[in-house]
Image: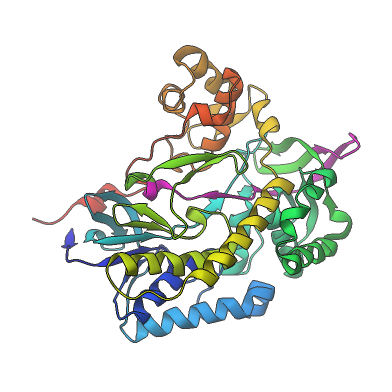
């Protein structure tokens, strides 16, 4: 285990937010350290394939290809010029007392910081349904990553389920790549989607682009569906059982199901640094508290989808703002921020429109059949969660300790929102009253050998 503990500014994450934060600091004459799990900068949204990959940026990123190229080139140039330090393929697994514990191929190293910018992004927000623990069920993000990074579809006949723009986007990307997409099942009804129009009008071109993508799906797209169960046998998924908006039962044969209901902010590291959280009723999740610039206190700054779910454009702006706040707090001259603050406010209106048009399926989750697996990592059923509430009360961490939900490999990333809905339903209250799972280190699985050193 090695240690570097000199004064420094560290950025965690090299997606749009992290890249823009780093570029802002570099422009001010500072030398940031950027730590990222990817082997090449770009984040999930602009994930880059391996060298020699034949698909072009236009094929990978569609209308966002120019933005992706610009970010990739900016970061690569500054790294090549030695104006920033890039720890690629490294994961921050713990934070304590101004130091990051970073897991890489060589084990764990400790990197100290004076100021920390967390640009940790977001992951898929998934909702359990009967059969979702079966082989052949993936998140929408996993399906997209496989397509971008390796050029493969994860099934021969695919059904996508969930709600929101990512559902449509992944469906059209798979179709464009030649995959057999049998159905795209949207749980939000047309009427519900219309309720978000006021917010979506903040970015009319983006909204129209989304409608154009949906049109490419044709009759595969079904709105206002009721998801019943994923059928499977010993080999994996065999069919999706669902009801259309008219209540008619449908069974769609398939060997892969991709699922997702928009995004869930990645907040584990923010939690370990001591950031405060508020429950957002519209997004139905706990989000870190910051000021407009991303300040979270104690030299911590948050940017991107890890604090506000505003997409790639919002992440770039938030990255610049967080870096500007950091520069100001250090006594450096910061770039102008008023234009970015106005843009961010417009993106916030648009995002709120999305949240209203494509809501988290709270009622579906609250009424899950008892036998449904709620936590895939620990194979905890909805019945076990409800029993935990009856036995130990309605606080999230109490139910976690009794049922083991959220104690597995993903550390609650995929089950926490559903478990807290189940607990809240049992208690007849909002998830806000239930609380959230406390973050614990390591936030990613880490081998014991990584912590050992030759004396």
Q: Residue 249, how many percent across, how many down?
A: 87, 35
Q: Residue 161, how many percent across, how many down?
A: 72, 47
Please report the bounds of the magenta region as a residue range. Answer: 242-270
Q: Does 54 sit left or right of 86 as displayed?
A: right
Q: Residue at x 65, y 48 (%)?
A: 260
Q: Is residue 268 located in the magenta-colored stretch of the structure? A: yes
Q: Quadrant of the C terminus?
A: bottom left
Q: Which quadrant of the view contains residue 152? A: bottom right
Q: Residue at x 49, y 37 (%)?
A: 377
Q: Is residue 130 located in the magenta-colored stretch of the structure? A: no
The residue closer to the viewer here, 213 or 22, is 22
Q: Residue at x 63, y 23 (%)?
A: 371
Q: Quadrant of the N terminus?
A: bottom left
Q: Is residue 226 above or below residue 223?
A: above
The residue closer to the viewer here, 350 or 223, is 350
Q: Does 317 sit left or right of 454 as displayed?
A: right
User: Residue at the top extreme?
Assistant: 391
Q: Is residue 107 above or below residue 374?
A: below
Residue 155 visible in the shown view? no
User: Residue at the front extreme?
Assistant: 338
Q: Residue 407, how many percent across, how many down?
A: 42, 34
Q: Is residue 71 above or below residue 328?
A: below
Q: Residue 108, how many percent across, how many down?
A: 25, 57
Q: Which quadrant of the view contains residue 404? A: top left
Q: Residue at x 60, y 56 (%)?
A: 141
Q: Does 320 sit left or right of 112 as displayed?
A: right
Q: Does 122 sit left or right of 12 as displayed?
A: right
């Amino acid at each position: 285990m090695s240690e570097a503990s000199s004064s420094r500014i560290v950025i965690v994450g090299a997606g749009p937010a992290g890249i823009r934060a780093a570029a802002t600091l570099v422009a001010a004459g500072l030398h940031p350290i950027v730590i990222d799990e990817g082997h090449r900068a770009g984040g999930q949204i602009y994930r880059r394939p391996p060298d020699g990959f034949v698909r072009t940026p236009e094929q990978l990123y569609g209308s966002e290809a120019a933005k992706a190229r610009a970010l990739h080139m900016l970061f690569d140039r500054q790294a090549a010029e030695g104006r920033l330090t890039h720890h690629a393929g490294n994961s921050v697994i713990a934070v304590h007392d101004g130091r990051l514990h970073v897991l890489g191929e060589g084990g764990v190293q400790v990197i100290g910081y004076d100021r920390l910018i967390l640009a940790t992004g977001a992951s898929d927000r998934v909702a359990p349904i009967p059969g979702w623990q079966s082989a052949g069920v993936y998140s929408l993000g996993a399906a997209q990553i496989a397509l971008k990074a390796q050029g493969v579809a994860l099934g021969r006949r695919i059904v996508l389920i969930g709600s929101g723009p990512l559902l449509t986007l992944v469906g059209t990307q798979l179709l464009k790549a030649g995959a057999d997409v049998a159905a795209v099942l949207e749980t939000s009804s047309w009427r519900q989607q219309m309720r978000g129009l006021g917010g979506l009008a903040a970015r009319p071109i983006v909204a129209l682009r989304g409608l154009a993508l949906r049109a490419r799906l044709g009759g595969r797209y079904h709105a206002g569906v009721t998801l019943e169960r994923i059928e499977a046998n010993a080999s994996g998924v065999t069919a999706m059982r669902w009801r259309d908006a008219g209540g008619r039962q449908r069974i769609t044969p398939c060997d892969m199901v991709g699922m997702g209901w928009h995004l869930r902010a990645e907040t584990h590291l923010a939690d370990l640094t001591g950031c405060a959280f508020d429950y957002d009723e519209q997004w139905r999740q706990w989000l870190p508290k910051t000021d407009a610039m991303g300040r979270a206190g104690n030299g911590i700054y948050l940017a991107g989808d890890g604090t506000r779910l505003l997409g790639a454009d919002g992440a770039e702006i938030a990255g610049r703002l967080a870096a500007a706040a950091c520069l100001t707090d250090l006594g450096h001259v910061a770039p102008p921020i008023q234009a970015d603050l106005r843009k961010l406010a417009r993106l916030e209106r648009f995002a709120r429109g999305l949240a209203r048009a494509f809501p988290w399926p709270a009622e579906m989750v609250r009424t899950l059949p008892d036998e449904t697996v709620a936590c895939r990592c620990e194979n905890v059923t909805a019945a076990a969660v409800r029993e935990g509430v009856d036995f130990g009360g309605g606080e999230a961490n109490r139910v976690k300790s009794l049922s083991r939900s959220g104690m597995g490999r993903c550390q609650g990333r995929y089950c926490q929102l559903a478990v807290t809905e189940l607990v809240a339903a049992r208690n007849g209250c909002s998830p806000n009253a239930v609380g959230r799972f406390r973050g614990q280190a390591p936030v990613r699985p880490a081998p014991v050998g990584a912590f050992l050193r030759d004396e």
